[in-house]
Amino acid sequence: MSIQAFKKVLIANRGEIAVRVLRGLRDLGIRTAVVYSEADRSSLPVLLADEIYPIGPAPSAESYLRAEAIVDLAVEIGADAIHPGYGFLSENADFARMCEEKGVVFIGPGSSAIAAMGSKIESRRLMIDAGVPVVPGGRDPLPDANAALAAAKGIGYPVMIKASAGGGGKGMRRIDSADALPQAFREAQSEAASAFGDDAVYLEKFIEEPRHVEIQILGDHHGKVVSLGERECSLQRRNQKVLEEAPSPVVDEPLRRAMGEAAVKAAEAVGYRNAGTVEFLLDAHQRFYFLEMNTRLQVEHPVTEEVTGIDLVQAQIRVAEGHPLGPELDDIQIRGHAIEVRLYAEDPFRNFAPSPGRIDILRWPEGPGVRNDSGVYEGAEVPIYYDPMIAKLVVFGSDRDQAIRRLKRALTEMRVEGISTSTPLFLRILDDEDFKAGRLDILMLERKLASGEWMPDDQEDQGLLPFVAAAIAHAERQQKITTVTSTGKPTNGHRSRWREAGRRESVGG
């Protein structure tokens, strides 16, 4: 493949990942263009990009999921490539195929690899044939509940029913007995059809108290695939990750090597190129099983960047341009420890109720080893229409203990007012003895929440702290902070020059 130097890339996403990709492109000297919905007109990516293009109303089906319109726009504006980020169209094989057909580079794997790994049933078959260990279970979709009952009897309870086209915990149920299976089967089929337009489901053995450990891989257009080590992603709520770290506290060098080799084998089985993640379940006996492959950049990619020193977004772009992976990636050394928390606009102690609205006050933590990947700013509106994650807070330390202390310091420095966030939950996790000892599994978070041991006590809810915080906030709002503009006139320091300047609807500076 010949090397094509990109001059302009269209970012087909929003929020923090659009900002992250934009920064990676800027660092390479590549012009940036973003699409935005009506709800995101004043979003951070729109304020930062070189070119901005409205793509439709707030609902994602009418904006960020308009695959053909986005590809046509890329052609119209002369973009060399599209970066899909994660979510939305990032694992849509038809979208990748449209790019290929219209001469726009899709910064990700080929459409055939996305299609193969997008079906959990098909990917299981491929992994079995490639010699990658998989969770015991079926190879085919189940036509009805009777077939599911027969399959479960052969596998042995408990079992998991899963949507073949699934993700994010949708179309997934744990089943402990034959009596519960028919209803769970119907619910999983219905949820899968609604979420993915595909009601195919299958069964596999439920692994008791497993850890979720994933391997980051990179592949180029010249047949080379490398492993960049593992991430521990066991802290989950409803099968969605909330905290990730690298390396895993229980993975030693021999296990890391074995899992890395299995991940590379999985990628090679589908001719994979660009960044991807092979997810495994790890049991108490250090046996690992293929779970699925995410054919895109992961939300948690920063922790791998911190411990390897590799910019994964720039690596994605260089691979898409046709550059081969260099020898520096042949023997990656993991150094230190990194932890990431996903900051959601929601109340974790009120059943994670969404908390959209205006961010009145925002102060990000700073200092050694602290990184913030954010999609918001003070005064920004958090819309109700999309995933509630507003930022990712990442810390790096010489070891896990230092990283935990650093993350706790960063969370206590951070201040967000106007919306609720998941910060209080993370502070409780960091103080938990099981977490500090590295005793994790994928149900730990839900067990702890169900037990009530992490709930705020009466003093926190009714004591002096809220009144002190309110008094400080009121004083800051009343304080007259002035700066001097280029015209020599004083202006209130809280006014946004972005808002004063305005933005053009198409091509910006």
Image (cartoon, rainbow, N blue to C red):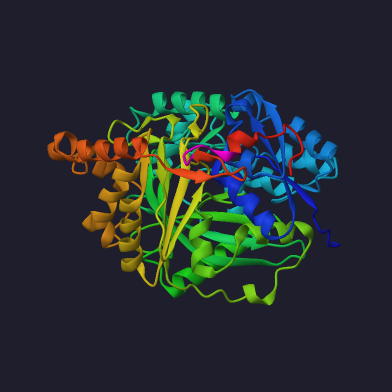
From what the image shows, is residue 342 above or below residue 403? above
- Give the magenta range: 492-497
Location of the N terminus (image quadrant): bottom right
Q: Depth check: 398 or 219 in front? A: 398
- Image position of 3 (left or right of 317): right
Q: Nearer the viewer, residue 99 or 258?
A: 99
Locate residue 225: give its quadrant.
Answer: bottom right
Q: What is the quadrant of the C terminus in the image?
A: top right
Q: Position of residue 282 (x, y in %)?
A: 41, 58
- Relative placement, left or right, of 105 versus 206 is right
Residue 131 visible in rendering: no
Give the side of residue 198 with respect to residue 79, left or right: left
**Quarter of the rendering containing residue 345:** top left
Residue 103 position within the rendered picture, expressed as x and y whole percent measured from the top left = 85, 45
Residue 284 picture location, percent across and down: 33, 60
**Residue 185 visible at all:** yes
Q: Nearer the viewer, residue 478 or 71?
A: 478
Q: Position of residue 473 (x, y in %)?
A: 31, 38
Residue lying at 36% horizontally and 66% vertically, measured from the top left: 250
- Main secondary structure along the magenta-highlighted residues: loop
Could you tell whether 91 is left or right of 195 in the image? right
194 within the magenta span: no
Residue 494 in magenta?
A: yes
Question: How many marks can you see?
Answer: 0
- Using the image as rendered, state which of residue 142 and residue 491 is in the foreground: 491
Q: Which residue is situated farthest in the front direction here?
A: 488
Quadrant of residue 465 in the image? top left
